Structure formats: structure tokens, C-alpha cells
Amino acid sequence: MLFSEPILLKTKIRLPVVKKNLIIRERLLDSLEQGMQGRMVTVCAPAGSGKSTLIAQWAQSARIQTSWVSLDERDNDIARFWRYVLNAYIETGPSSLADSLSAVGALVSGSTVNAIIDTLLNELAATQDPIALVLDDYHHIEKAEIHNSLSYYIEYLPSHHRIIIASRGEISFDAAKWLARGERTDIGMQQLHFTQEETHEFCRSAGIYLEQRHTRKLFEKTEGWVAGLQLASISLQAQQDMDRIIAGFDGSNEKVSSYLFQEVLDKLPPGVTDFLLQTSVFERMDAEVCNQAFKRSDSREMLEQLRILNLFVIPLDNHNGWFRYHSLFAEFLKNRLRSRSREQWLKYHHAAASQAFAARGMLDKAIDHAIAGESYKEAAERLEQYIPDALKQGELASLLERIQAVSEHIPIPASLLMYQAFAHLLLGQMHFSAETVEKLETMYEQPDTAAELEPLQGGMLFLQSNLLFYTGRYEQWDSFVGYRLQGVLPEDPIFYNFNYNMIEPLVRRTAFGLKGILSADTERIGQRFVSVLEQHGWGQSLINLYVVQALSEGYYEWNRQSDSLQLIRKIEQSDRARQTAGLFIPNRITLSRLYAANGQYQKAHEAIDEAVQMADQKGEYHWLYPLRASRAHLYVKEDNLAEAKAEISRLRLSDRIQPASNRWTEYTVYARVLTAQGKTTEALRQLEFIKSSIEQDPCFLVRTEISVVQSLAEYQRGNRGAAMQLLHEALVIGESNGYIRSFVDEGIQMKKLLQMYAEHRQREAVQNESPSVSLAYVQRLLECFPQQDNPSQPQPVLVEPLTEQETFILQLLGQGAPNKQIAAKLALKEGTVKVYLSRIYAKLGVSSRTQALAAARELDGLAE
């Protein structure tokens, strides 16, 4: 069987078969082995230079396990690219790694790639045995998002793992930093070329015994080019006139290869030549697909004959089941077929290859061959069959590319247009989605095409609703729903049961949740949308449950706790929600926050435990990261710093590299833990990393949270001006969306900071802040904090500001820590702690620990 999953081509992730009689090129193998001391090796040289052969030869005897991905043009889809990388590790890695990654592989999509990469990196870090990942033919990759994701991956790659990249040209992302660090080894064209001695040995191993002058001339003509030598060996085996053959080596590698390929074909039986031209349309083939495509019964024998003749046919497994032609030979054969008969070229793609792959259930290959054979109507029909798999696999870029290729030649069906709009919507390409929906609307208004769209009204409703909703055209949405909803809502399970959240711990942070936008309009429309869906029997659809969860999160943010809890209970009673991690985990996190807001920390932990259990049972381990962060945040709120540190340490976070966008939750909690430890400088550096990574992301919830945590860190270290400015940034977003819990959940320190902000605004009467924040909003926030028993007293004034270290020591005093414990926590001697305490007493104008604590409670910026 070719696939373990419909999408996975196993031959792409298996180590190439190495011929037994190859020349062992010790100097190059040594270079590769030496390169394993660093992070990465690049092998860059033109086609036919022996890159893949060299790496495969090294891998056979290497002391490190090797995972392999053979890339092609179709891998310019970020989901497909990383799915193959993931499965390459599963294929060859230890069983423990395969077990942990197998469930993750099913979650790969364009929207989850960052989470999958981080999961892979964490699993590799936990793997004892080193693994080298080979990305062969990387020159096929052109998409910047793939280059960027791979650069991130290499930067984070655990120290005992390696990566080897083979390409016809220079790699297309900046790798200079690894070269400067001594972590990158480059093997180039000149190193790959055969020496004169290797040329002689190569010919001798092929059974060709040349005179010294012939060897020298052959080396000079080929310049050590491996493919040229291999071609020459084939021609020279059947020729006595060696001088004539060698003299034909004149010009570029392309000209030389064409010359020698022609020499080879001229001497083959016509039946073999016909088979070569027929099968040139395949990227990969086995006997079954060749027989089926060309009504043959001898394909197995023909492939074996080609292998024995050494005719640039490369086995892709150890059973001689699947093969491909060398890229140079394949291109030569294709050009030969096209020039001989365009009609045959199209026929072989359409009538042969496309139908053969369709019969094998390989729809993606069938579609590609139908397009290459200019059978666009058939390609469109197969695309409609392929849509569910494409959406499930998350390869939206590839899907759109195929639809575009068909639409350039024929009018595509309305159903395909609708899925095209849906794919654009999922990718956040609202403009293109809207353009496509307008085409559908035009078709609906025309009598001859209106009937075609009638069964698609469910999908149309969904697309138009979302476009109006995403763009804030709420009044139009009301009119649209009233106009469209007549009778029973047509069923369209692909739209209404699509899983819209694969990685975000809160639905409100997703594009589906409008990236944190909250308003009376979003509430009203959300409620009406739920009402419409439930009236038409779609109450248990994923889209309805996601809207309910988003409403619940919104109510919590607005401090409408009873409304939030009511919807939380509604979600948790749904069996569908309990089977969908993207729903259930945000639901439990919201419930945990509700409990914590009311001081019920044990119940808050139990809610997180439920979510962890679900993630474990379903094997969706990437959810454990935000859940552990949520638990660490609970410990911080409980002043249980030791447990918070232990929990956050399990996430293997780095404080030197900019975090991936999907890890905002973990890194923000990490910054909170650092702040609680008194390490505000480190916390602020980490927060700046996060902030720079979300500059292009309009998620208001995330931006607010980061600014809030930054303001508290600045406040703690006494930098009140910076704290006020950062708080202002958060309040601007907060007021426009009515946020409350984003501030109130921060506790007494945030209350003090808000009071200071209000006093500052009243005292300074600031006129130039734009946009401004109303004092009424600030007062409303202050009223939502729990009432404190002790009224505020006049604040003492520091003789001299406390340092960050002194501030932290004072916090530890407030927790009742004795000098010995403070010394152990800060890795200081007890005598040094006493010196610090003397300085603190002097700055506070007191003479004892008790007086210092009393003064500290009256000072802004210090923990009580």
C-alpha cells in the first residue's frame, strides 16, 4: 500500500537505496561527519552532482539515526512540508518518539504549524538518541513562510540533533548566523566533483578500463561532474570508439547530458524507449500504476530491466517496488515526449496517469495529472471529491493553487467556487474570499445559474455571515440574515462541522473569535446566530458550540460571571464538545478563571486537570503547554512561587530567542513568574520579545495582556512613568472593547496602578494623549476590585529608591522568609543578606524588620 494516510507518500520519507558498487569517497564522508559537530550541513551543487547519493552513503554507516524527506514542487504548502518532516521522524526515530508524534501528525494544518513545530522540538529535546534530518532537493521550496519556519526550527533545534539540506542552489533563508557561530558546514560543487583518481576508479568499477590518456581527457571534459561520468560509462560500455564519445563532451552540463542521453536511447530496443517515454510523466511509479495507465502487463519486468541497465532509474524502497527517474533523465524524457507528440503528452497525463491514480484512490496525483493533461473538466470533478480530504489535511494553499489552475481555463462549478472562498476565509484572506462570494452572488441573480446555487445556500449563508461579521458590518449582517433565512437551513456539514480551533487556549483569541473584539453588536449577533442554528437543528454543530464558547469567554471578560458560567455548563454538557480539544480546553480554562476570580483555587486547579486529562487521552499533547502555563499562573495568584517555577520549567522555554506566535500564553506566564521572583529586568526583556513577535497580529486580548504584565513589572521596579504609559496602552484597547477581567484579575498591584493612573490624569489634566481613556472607565474598573479592609494612608517617601534586588528581598520578608532562606534563594551568604537589610532599613528610614514591612505596605510598587 502506498499510503499510511491518504496524504502521505511513504517513498518520500525513506532513505534512498544505495548501490553496492559505488565509489567510497572518504574525503566527502569525512566532511559530512565533521559537519555533525555543528547544527547544520548544506550540500549545494547543480543537478547530477551526487548530492543525494553522498548523503545516503553517509547515512548508511553514520553513528547517528537519519530521517529523510525528498522534496518536490508540491511541498510548497507549509502544512504538507511539515507533515512530511514530522512523519520522517516517526518513520525512523525511536518508538517513544513515534508514539508521541503520531497523534500530533493528524493535527498539522496551515493554522497549527507553529504549534506543531514547537511540539516536535520539545519531543526531540526529550529524545536521548541524536537524529539527523535530511531535506533533499530543498531548491523546490519557494514559499517565504516555509523558509521562515525552517529557520525558526533550526534555531531551536536541540543541541544533540542535526539537519542536512541538499539543494541545487544556495539555500533561500539567512543562515549566516550559524556559519558565524561555527555551527554550519558547507559542501559545494567543487568538493563534489570527482578527482582524476576517482574518475579512473569510477570507470574501473563500471567495468570500463581506460587508457591513462582517456581517463585524463574524460576528467578534463566532465570536470568531475558525476552525472556526466555516469552517462559516459553507459555509452562507453557499448562503444569501441572512445575518442568519439569523449570528444562529444562539449559545452554546458545540459548540452552534455542531452548528447549522452541521446547516445543511450539510440542503442535501446524500441520497446524500452516507448516505456521510458510513457512513464516519463510519473514523478514516482510502481509496476501496478504503469500497467494500469498504459494497459500493460510487463511493467515489473521493464522496471527491473531498466534498473539492471543502470538507466537512471532510482529504487525508492528496498523491495524494488517504487521507482523514479533521475531528475536530469526525467526532464530529458519529458522534453523528448513533448517535442515528438504533444497529443501523446496530453494523453499520457490524462487518459493514463490521471485515471490510474484515481483508480488507486490517489486523488491529489490524479488532479495534478488531469491539469497537466489539460483535462480541466475532469480535474474540477476530482477536486470536488478531494475537498473534504484537503480541508482535513489543512493543505489550503495547494487546494487554492489547483482550483486557480482549473479556473484559468474553464468556468468552475459554483460548489468549487464556494470552497475556494472558504479556503481563503480560513487563511484570513478576506479580500479574495469576498471577491469569490461576489461571483457566487452574481450567479444566484441569474435565472440560468440560480438553480445550481439553491442547494448551496447553507454554505453561502456561512460565508457571507462570516465576511460581514469579520469586517464589522453588523447592520448588513442583520439585513442579510433576515433576507436569507427562509424555511429550513440547508445542511452543509463541511462548513458547520469544521474544527476552527486547533491551537489557541481561548476561542476569543482566534480569527473565528474576532481576535478579542467585544461589543454589544458582537454579543447580539452571536446570540442571534446561535438562535438561528439551534432552531434549524444545528445546536450540536461545531460552529454553534464555538460561538457559544466565544460568548462565554466574552461574558467573563465583561465580568458577567453568571452569564459566562451558564454557557460554560451548556458546552460541557455536549458530547461533541468533550471530544473536541479546541472547544473543551478553552472551556475548562475559562471555568478555571471563574473559580480563581472567586478565590476557589482548588476548583480552578481541578478544571485545568480535566483539560489535561482530555489532552492526554486524545494524544493532543501540544495542548499541555498552555494548560501547564495556566496552572503556573494559578500558583502565582496563590503566592505559591515554588510550584509556579516547577510548572513553568517543564515547558522548556528560552529567554534568548524570540518565541513563536502560538506560545504567547506560556511566555507571558513565564514573565509573570520572573516578576514574582524579583527578576523584572529578565521579565521585561522576555515581554519585549513577545511584543515584537505580535506586531503584525491584531489580537487585542494578547496585546492587552502583554502591556498589562509589562506595566506591572515596570511598576514593581519603581519605573512609574513607563508603567503608566504601558497601562495607558492597555486601557485604550480595554475601553474600546469593555475589558474588565484583563485588569481586575491582576489583583491589588493593578488596583494601585489604576489609582495612580486616575490621580495622574486628574492632576496633570493631560490633553495630548490620543486616543484618550475616560476616567469613567478607569473608575468602573476600580469598582470591580474586591474591597480592601484597610483605608489608604499617606504614603512615606523613600530616602533613596530601592534596587531591584532590594525590592525582591523586601518581598521575601513580607512572606515571612528568615535570613537563611533569603540567602539560599538568592545564592548569597547570610552576612551579605544582613548588609542588604541594613541598606533597606536606611532607605526606608526604619530600624527593624517589622517597621520595614509596615513602611513597605504603604509604598506603591512593593508587594504586600
Image (cartoon, rainbow, N blue to C red):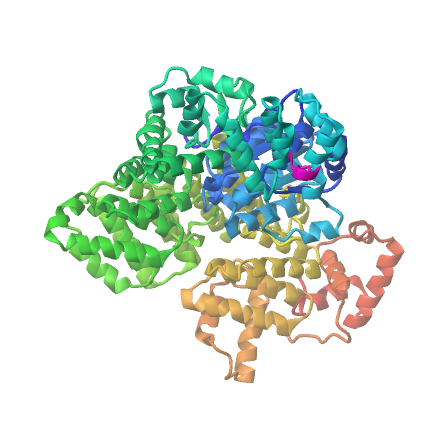
Image side of residue 836 versus residue 235, left or right: right
Q: At 36% across and 43% down in the image, what residue appears?
A: 402
Give 451 or 819, whichever is nearer the viewer: 451
Q: At 41% across and 32% down in the image, what residue appears?
A: 281
Q: At 19% across and 56% down in the image, what residue appears?
A: 442
Above-or-below relation of 435 to 220: below
Asked whether 283 falls inside the magenta stretch, the response is: no
Give 595 or 245, whichever is nearer the viewer: 245
Indicate the quadrant containing the C terminus: top left, top right, bottom left or bottom right.
bottom right
| Magenta stretch, main secondary structure class | helix
Q: Position of residue 843 (x, y in %)?
A: 79, 71
Q: Position of residue 468 (x, y in %)?
A: 29, 59
Q: Position of residue 31 (x, y in %)?
A: 75, 37
Quarter occupied by residue 798:
bottom right
Indicate the quadrant containing the N terminus: top left, top right, bottom left or bottom right.
top left
Q: Is residue 559 visible?
A: no
Q: At 70% across and 22% down in the image, what residue appears?
A: 209
Q: Position of residue 603 (x, y in %)?
A: 50, 42
In this picture, which residue range is highlighted in magenta? 220-227
Above-or-below relation of 479 to 299: below
Image side of residue 535 versus residue 515, left or right: left
